[in-house]
Image (cartoon, rainbow, N blue to C red):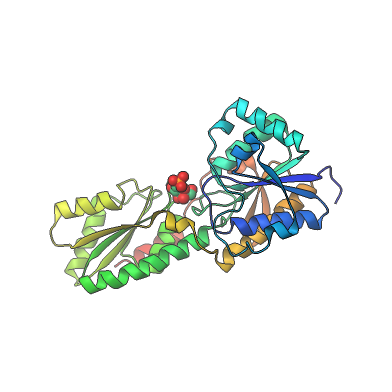
Amino acid sequence: MENNISKIGVFTSGGDAPGMNAAIRAVVRASIYYNKEIYGIMQGYEGMISGEIVKLGARSVGNIIQRGGTILKSARSQEFRTPEGRAKAYQNLKKNGIDSLIAIGGDGTFTGLHKFFEEYKVPSICIPGTIDNDIAGTDYTIGYDTATNTAVEAIDKIRDTALSHNRLFFIEVMGRHSGYIAINSAIAGGAIAVIIPEETTSFDQLFNLLEQAGNTNRKSSLVVVAEGSKIGGANELAKKVAERSNYFDIKVTILGHLQRGGSPTYFDRVLASRMGIAAVEGLLKGENGVMVGIRNNEMVYNSFDSIIHHHHAIDAESLRIAKILSI
Ligand code: F6P
């Protein structure tokens, strides 16, 4: 492959996600396979600004494919949002001879890289890594499958105790702007209802559904609520239901950051491995200012403009299934 790339910098940024290590491993090994030097930039844009940059080899990424988190660490950098921060970052790349970048992260990461790419023209490719699955241009992001499985496992356990005590549980899952974890963990976990930011279920509709379930002898129910719910989080909804009726014995569980950790599923490991290789091969083929995605099981490249701030809509079929099964 003919190109001017010789030293690639890789980093993880934003919220960590299971499978990021598998992606780092794939980027490092693919770079070495194509006889390129590969450098790890620690803590995302923070390390680019402070110059915390380490040379990586094939053995530096041994024994990490199964590990959650990210060996390169992650951060949400405020300084990189400033022109001064980005100028320092560019100087550090130059000092280390790094001529191209691969970023693993979410929308915030891509927005930063897009700006940097416009200003300094460093060839750059992104890999979508976030549990939220909220990135346009890809059917799946790295970490989403693992996080959803974690949520389902937790929901199954809550179901046991909910059933024993005839209780109504509100279970809050992550997703500030996205209902992907919520809708699919609700379907897989057999929840009576799911509240997501993308859909407008009113509180009255939710309450009627719960009341009807009580009237038809349903003993216990689970409601999955995405963090970004527009009608209130799990605590707020539980409080509102309790205010309107004393029929229910209500409990709340917030799953929180446990959804971000743990060993990645086979799906996330394979996805991360494919995306890591596609990112390196893309750079070497001259792809630039793009994000790797998976569409109908094929690797694709999307321009930054086509993905940044574009919403990855929840498919209508998932919403339909969740509704039919909630009776
Ligand atoms: O973007 C991933 C995510 O886990 C969201 O689901 C969640 O809202 C957010 O990150 C939490 O971020 P932090 O760990 O910085 O509190």
Q: Position of residue 320 (x, y in %)?
A: 40, 62
Q: Position of residue 100 (x, y in %)?
A: 74, 42
In the figure, residue 273 lies in which quadrant?
Answer: bottom right
Q: Residue furthest top?
A: 84
Q: Position of residue 28 (x, y in %)?
A: 72, 54
Q: Position of residue 79 (x, y in %)?
A: 56, 31
Residue at point 79%, 49% (across, down): 37
The quadrant of the image that shows the C terminus is: bottom left
Q: Is residue 321 visible?
A: no
Residue 200 left/right relative to 266: left
Q: Residue furthest right?
A: 2
Residue at point 74%, 40% (across, down): 123
Instruction: Looking at the picture, tell me which residue is in the foreground, 125 or 207.
Output: 125
In the figure, residue 185 lies in which quadrant?
Answer: bottom left
Residue at point 51%, 46% (across, down): 311
In the figure, residue 81 lies in which quadrant?
Answer: top right
Q: Is residue 168 visible?
A: yes
Instruction: Looking at the picture, tell me which residue is in the foreground, 218 or 158.
Output: 158
Q: How many marks?
A: 0
Instruction: Looking at the picture, tell me which residue is in the foreground, 169 or 99.
Output: 99
Q: Residue furthest left?
A: 246
Residue 312 left/right relative to 241: right
Instruction: Looking at the picture, tell me which residue is in the foreground, 136 or 69.
Output: 69
Residue 10 left/right relative to 222: right
